[in-house]
Image (tube, rainbow, N blue to C red):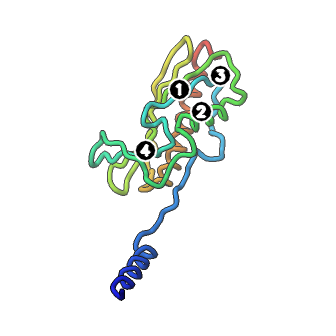
Amino acid sequence: MRQLSIIVIALGLYGCGGATHQEPRTFDLGLEAPGARIPTVHIGSVRAIAPFDTPDMQYRLVYRNATEIATFAHSRWAASPADMFRKQLLRASGDGAGKCSMDVDIQEFSQVFSAREASEARIDLRASVRGGASRSVSIVEPNAGADAASGAAAVARAANRAIGELGAWVGAQPGCR
């Protein structure tokens, strides 16, 4: 009986101090509207390819294997990258009315680690104006830190830069002026 008591006490102590529980953290692209404006365009569909079509926060350890995509265990996006990016596009376009309509396909939305403590945020997308031109945009935001929180802030900066590039491109389209 004494041995059983010792085992129960030891297991209880291990449960209290041995393993730490980490609360899940949720991130989005921030409260501020993008600094750039998108002129006179209706925001159509915004989609993301798998695995970027879920709220999972994705990363790559390119120093180990550039083709492997992993998910942060205790961090996630507040919504899918497509939903968050669409919200930012709508904020940048004002009322969303315009002479043309733009669709966006997100092809990469991740934090990319070149070393254990060095990463960058990366957003690759393809935008098209319905009935007109299309354009690929690739944004790399350096200094994304070594954790999900730093990566989320860098992805937000990259999203704002992508919106600026899309705004300049849409403004140059003859059917959108």
Q: CA distance from mark 3 to mark 1?
A: 12 Å
Q: Earlier in the sequence, mark 4 or mark 1?
A: 4
Residue 166 in the image, given as x and y percentages of width and height? 55, 28
Q: Position of residue 61 (x, y in %)?
A: 33, 48
Rate crowding at label 2 as few (under 14), some (14 to 19) or many (20 or more) other CA atoms within 10 Å: some
Q: Earlier in the sequence, mark 1 or mark 2?
A: 2
- The residue shown at (61%, 47%) is 30
Q: Amino acid at mark 2?
A: Arg
Whether pointer 1 and pointer 2 mark residues with C-beta atoms closer than 8 Å, the reply is yes
Separation of marks 4 and 1 at Cα, in angstroms: 19 Å
Q: Nearer the viewer, residue 77 or 118?
A: 77
Residue at mark 3: 42
Q: Is residue 115 left or right of residue 42?
A: left
Asked if the residues shown at circle 3 and circle 4 are in contact, with their CB atoms under 8 angstroms apart, the answer is: no
Can the viewer see residue 139 in this picture?
A: no
Using the image, determine if residue 3 lies above or below residue 52.
below
